Image (tube, grey):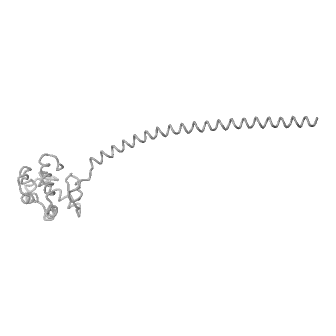
């Protein structure tokens, strides 16, 4: 009888072990299925985020391109960067002080049809020529008229920039013409 109980005990143990293995395998398969579902869900979310991100990047890129197009760095033929003063007057080179920059602005505005600045309304600050006159002047006549009313330092700066460069003189003529057309000196 001991042998029968021992045999039944072993059979029961094998049956319990079999049920445990089947249960463990089922749990393993369920876990794998859940992992697969999570991966699919994450991939869908990533795809939608990527699409949204790509759309945002495309939008940002378009905005950046628009900004680049409107804020293009302009240069002269010699490769000098053309910069703007706070009043929109183009210049090249550097100023030693804010006062020098302000004086340059006043001189350009006075000579290019910008009129008096900062409430000034003197005979000196009004242009002695029109944009049409500037078209018909020789380069030397134009530069002389352009520099009228400027300090010696400003006039020297204009001369040094214009020296050997018809482009700068053309640029100044364009500024005078643009101001004459009410375009604020930008062309």
Whole-percent x, y for residue 140 in the image: 7, 60
Q: On the picture, is 106 further left or further right than 71? A: left
Residue 159 vs 33, above or below: the answer is below
Q: Give the residue displayed 84% in from the left and 35% down from the top.
A: 11
Above or below, comparing residue 182 to residue 148 in the picture: above
Q: Quadrant of residue 21?
A: top right
Q: Quadrant of residue 171?
A: bottom left
Q: Count up the numbered dots.
A: 0
126 to the left or right of 100: left
In the image, 186 versus 58, the foreground residue is 58
- Image point 33% across, 44% down: which residue? 63
Residue drawn where x is 20% and y is 54% of the image: 90
Q: Is 163 or 12 nearer to us in this picture?
A: 12
Q: Quadrant of residue 19?
A: top right
Quadrant including the N terminus: top right
Question: Is residue 180 depicted above or below 19 in this figure?
Answer: below
Q: Return the x and y of residue 164 as percentages of the image width and height.
A: 14, 62
How far from the left and from the top, in percent, is residue 88? 21, 51
Seen in the image, is 50 located left or right of residue 72? right
Q: Position of residue 44 (x, y in %)?
A: 50, 37
């Amino acid at each position: 009888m001991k042998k029968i109980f021992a045999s039944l005990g072993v059979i029961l143990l094998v049956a319990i072990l079999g049920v445990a293995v089947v249960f463990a395998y089922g749990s393993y398969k369920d876990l794998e299925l859940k992992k697969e579902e999570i991966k699919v869900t994450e991939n869908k979310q990533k795809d939608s985020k990527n699409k949204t991100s790509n759309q945002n990047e495309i939008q940002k890129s378009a905005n950046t391109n628009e900004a680049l197009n409107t804020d293009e760095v302009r240069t002269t033929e010699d490769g000098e960067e053309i910069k703007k003063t706070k009043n929109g007057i183009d210049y090249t080179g550097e100023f030693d002080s804010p006062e020098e920059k302000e004086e340059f602005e006043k001189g350009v505005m006075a000579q290019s049809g910008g009129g008096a600045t900062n409430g000034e309304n003197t005979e000196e600050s009004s242009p002695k020529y029109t944009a049409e006159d500037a078209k018909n002047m020789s380069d030397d006549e134009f530069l002389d008229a352009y520099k009228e009313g400027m300090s010696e330092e400003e006039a020297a700066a204009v001369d040094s920039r214009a020296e050997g460069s018809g482009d700068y003189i053309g640029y100044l003529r364009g500024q005078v013409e643009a101001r004459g057309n009410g375009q604020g000196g930008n062309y």
